[in-house]
Image: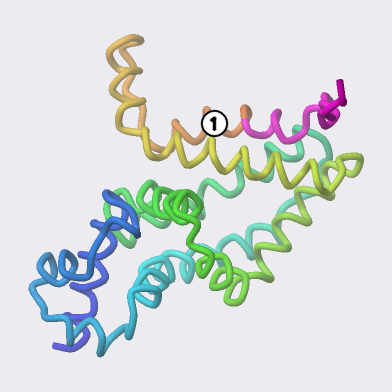
Amino acid sequence: MAKTTKADILDAAEHLFSKQGFTQTSMREITAAANVNLASVNYHFGSKKNLIQAVLKRYFDLLMPEVKTTLKKLPFNDGSEGVAQLLRALIKPMLKLNQIQPNGTATFVQLLGRGYNETQGHLRRFIMTDYGSTVRTLVSEIQRRLPSLAQEELFWRLHFAMGSFVFSMASAQALTEIAESDFDKHVDINQVISHLVPFVAQGLADDLVFPASTSEEG
C-alpha cells in the first residue's frame, strides 16, 4: 500500500510539474490529484523540494547508467561529426525513458526545462551531487571533440543546445502534426530528435565566435 501511495504521489506530481511548473503547482493540487492527504506526502518525501527531486530521480536513475555505458563504448572522432556521433549515441538512452511513463522522454526534458526556467537551484545541486560524475564525463567528451573551443564558449553553447532540446521536446506533438500537415509525413519522437542532432552538433562545433561586446564611453 505504501509503495502504491508513493507511486501515486510521484505520478500526480510529475504530471502537474510538467504542465504547470514547479512554482505554480501547490501541494494541495498534488494531494488532490493523488487522492492522498498532506501527511502522506510529508511522510514519503518530507518537503516539496524532495518531491521534485524524487520525480526526476526516477528518470536519472535509468538514464545516467545508460549514458555512462554508452560513452565508454563510443569511438572517438573530433569536430562536428564527432559531436553528432556522440549525440546520436545518446538517443537510445533518452528514448528508454519512455519505459517509465508514456512520453517519458519528452516529460523528462520538460521537467529539466522547468528547473532552468524557474531557477530551481536545488536541482542543480541534486544532479551534480548524485550524477555529477557522469555529467562531467559527458561534458569532457564533448570538449575532447572540440579542443580549440574555449571552456566559457562551450558553456554558452551547451546551454543554448539544451534550450533547443527542451523547446523541441516540449513542442514535439505540434512539430509532428505540422510535419504531417505540410509534408504528409508521419514523424515520431525518434525522428524529431534525429532532425535536431545535426543542428545542435553544428551549433556546438561551429568555428564562428563573436567577441564579447564592450560599452564605450561617449
Residue 104 % position (x, y): 34, 53
| Residue drawn at x 77%, y 44% as measured from the top left | 154
Q: Quadrant of residue 128?
A: bottom right
The residue segment tinted magenta is 200-218
In the image, is residue 193 part of the stretch drawn in magenta?
no
Left or right placement of residue 190 versus residue 72 in this view: left
Kindly identify the amino acid type of the residue bearing the numbered disc 1.
Answer: Leu
Residue 36 % position (x, y): 11, 78
| Residue drawn at x 86%, y 40% as measured from the top left | 149
Nearest the eye: 70 or 94: 94
Left or right placement of residue 215 versus residue 3 in this view: right
To which residue does mark 1 refer?
196
| Residue drawn at x 18%, y 72% as measured from the top left | 8
Report whether residue 95 is seen. no
Nearest the eye: 192 or 36: 36
Left or right placement of residue 1 versus residue 25 in this view: left
